[in-house]
Amino acid sequence: MRRVILALLITFVLSAEAFAYVRIEPQYLKSSDSTSYELVNETLAIIFNRVKPKISTNKYPKYFHDYTVIKDDGTQSKNYYYVKNGKVELLYAVDTNELKYIALVRPELQKCRIMYDYPSGNLHAVQIYVSGSEYFIFGPDGKYVDYSPYVREVHEKVQKNWKVPSRKEVEKLAKGQKDLLVQIAITVGKDGRVKKTVILKSSKIKALDENAQEAVKSSSPFKPFPENFFNEEMVVTLNFNFSL
């Protein structure tokens, strides 16, 4: 009997240790990363000074039903339903209604979410928001997740596959028109495939708009997202300048 109790105690201690707070040395931003780097770094220091690498997820409902969603304050992704559940936010995937992440929100800090995977409960990412258009993501190891190399690869691949019409052909199509910029926003999924293409600015010349779209089509798919990317998808803006 004593051995059984002892084994249970050991299991309890190990479980407690797994859910205990730890200190992680984060990768602080540099002044070149953002004008708000000091504010972000202050928040990082507080969060990673005492963070749980794992939480229990047993009590949270797996599927989204008719729950009341949280009003978007500009920090929400359109891919999820955000639901308040006690002191946490539950993020349900819009396409499957399944629970994907559990977010601990620290209202006393700069807007941020400490994200945990469901159902594993493992720390997934820390999101820190500066504004609606500027936010930063840090992995469970505290390292800054920089999206710019991936975006740069997308631009380079499209540029390589862009079959630019000859100057003579462009002149014939333009008929004296000077502004021949085509701007396209593409939504890339985590598997690297283009899910959506939207022309933000048309050249008003169908053949040139189609030429730009063909460059995107021939470049897809791109590389799958790295494992440390939080997003299920991202929007990349591409400029095609046919101007003479």
Image (tube, rainbow, N blue to C red):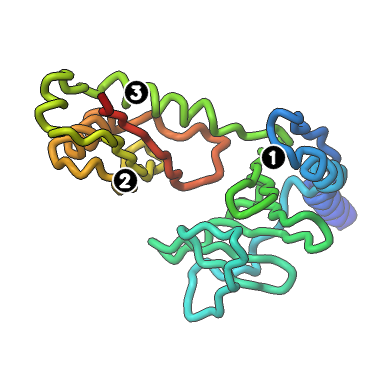
Q: CA distance from mark 1 to mark 3?
A: 30 Å
Which residue type does callout 2 highlight? Lys
In front of the other: 118 or 11? 118
Question: To which quarter of the image does residue 104 belong?
Answer: bottom right
Dot 1 falls on a residue whose secondary structure is loop
Task: Please give left or right for residue 169 compared with residue 52 in the image.
Answer: left
Residue picked out by circle 1: 140
Query: Which quadrant, please, contains the N terminus?
Result: bottom right
Which residue type does callout 1 highlight? Pro
Query: Which quadrant, please, contains the C terminus?
Result: top left
Q: Pointers 3 and 2 in contact (CB under 8 A)?
A: no
Q: Residues within 10 Å of mark 3 (few under 14, many from 20)?
A: some
Residue picked out by circle 3: 157
Residue 214, horizontal then vertical, whole percent: 19, 33
> In this orientation, does residue 133 appear?
yes
Dot 2 falls on a residue whose secondary structure is strand
Residue 238, horizontal then vertical, whole percent: 37, 35
* Numbered label attached to residue 201: 2
Q: CA distance from mark 2 to mark 1?
A: 39 Å
